[in-house]
Structures are given as structure tokens and as C-alpha cells.
Image (cartoon, grey):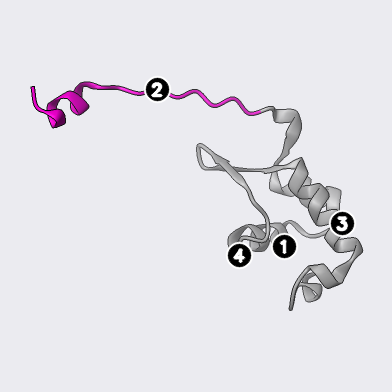
């Protein structure tokens, strides 16, 4: 049996468990921070917020929300052009 044939016969299954108490949907995150949900989606798209995607559904870790809340308190850390979204 060649290496390629052996690799074709190997099946790997991975199970990922997400603590749903530690993540929020984008609309919930926007409400908690006090900004519009469209801003959350823009920040997700630009990479400002790290989101987890499960079956096409975005989830935002509460640690990201806490980080953003600190940045909103100190707008100098938000970056150029972000203050216009707030």
C-alpha cells in the first residue's frame, strides 16, 4: 500500500465544544456594547473583532466584547476612522 492509499483510508473526526455562555451573537454583542449591529458586522469584516463561525453562524467571544468595551472607553485605541461609527 502506498502512502497516498494509506492516507485515503484514514478518517479523522474532531469534536469542538463551545461554551455558549462565553459567546454572543452579533446583535446581542452590539446591544451590550451600545452600538449598532451593522458596526459589529463591519468590525468583523475588517478584522477588528475576532468572531467564531460555526455552521455559517457568527459568534463573538465575551472576551472580545470586554476588549471592545475598554477600547470604547478610551477612543484613542480604536484606530483611525472608527470614532465615526460610534
* Quadrant in which the C terminus is drawn: bottom right
14 w.r.t. 50: above or below: above
**Which residue position is annotated with label 2?**
13
Give 73 or 33, whichever is nearer the viewer: 73
Dot 4 or dot 3: first in sequence order is 4
Disc 1 and disc 3: Cα gap in Å? 16 Å
User: Of circles 4 and 3, which is in front?
Assistant: 3
Dot 1 or dot 3: first in sequence order is 1
Callout 3: SS: helix
- Numbered range of the magenta stretch: 1-18
How far from the left and from the top, in percent, is residue 85?
A: 77, 71
| Mark 2–mark 3 CB contact (< 8 Å) | no
Q: Examine the structure image and report whether residue 39 is included in the region drawn in magenta.
A: no
User: How many C-alpha atoms fall within 10 Å of the one at disc 2: few (<14), some, or many (≥20)?
Assistant: few
**Which residue position is annotated with label 1?**
39
Residue at the image position 14 percent from the left and 31 percent from the top: 4
| Mark 4–mark 3 CB contact (< 8 Å) | no
Q: How many marks?
A: 4
Residue at the image position 85 percent from the left and 48 percent from the top: 32
How far from the left and from the top, in percent, is residue 30?
A: 78, 52
**Which residue position is annotated with label 3?**
70
**Residue 77: mark in rendering:** none
**Residue 46: mark in rendering:** 4
How far from the left and from the top, in percent, is residue 51?
A: 63, 48
Disc 2 and disc 4: Cα gap in Å? 31 Å
Outermost residue toward the left?
1
Give 51 or 37, whichever is nearer the viewer: 51
Disc 4 and disc 3: Cα gap in Å? 19 Å
Callout 4: SS: helix
Callout 2: SS: loop
Amino acid at each position: 500500500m502506498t502512502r497516498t492509499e494509506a492516507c485515503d483510508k484514514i478518517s479523522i473526526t474532531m469534536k469542538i465544544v463551545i461554551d455558549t455562555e462565553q459567546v454572543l451573537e452579533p446583535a446581542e454583542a452590539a446591544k451590550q456594547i451600545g452600538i449598532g449591529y451593522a458596526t459589529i458586522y463591519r468590525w468583523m469584516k475588517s478584522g477588528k473583532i475576532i468572531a467564531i463561525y460555526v455552521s455559517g453562524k457568527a459568534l463573538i467571544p465575551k472576551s472580545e466584547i470586554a476588549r471592545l468595551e475598554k477600547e470604547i472607553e478610551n477612543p484613542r485605541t480604536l484606530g483611525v476612522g472608527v470614532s465615526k461609527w460610534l
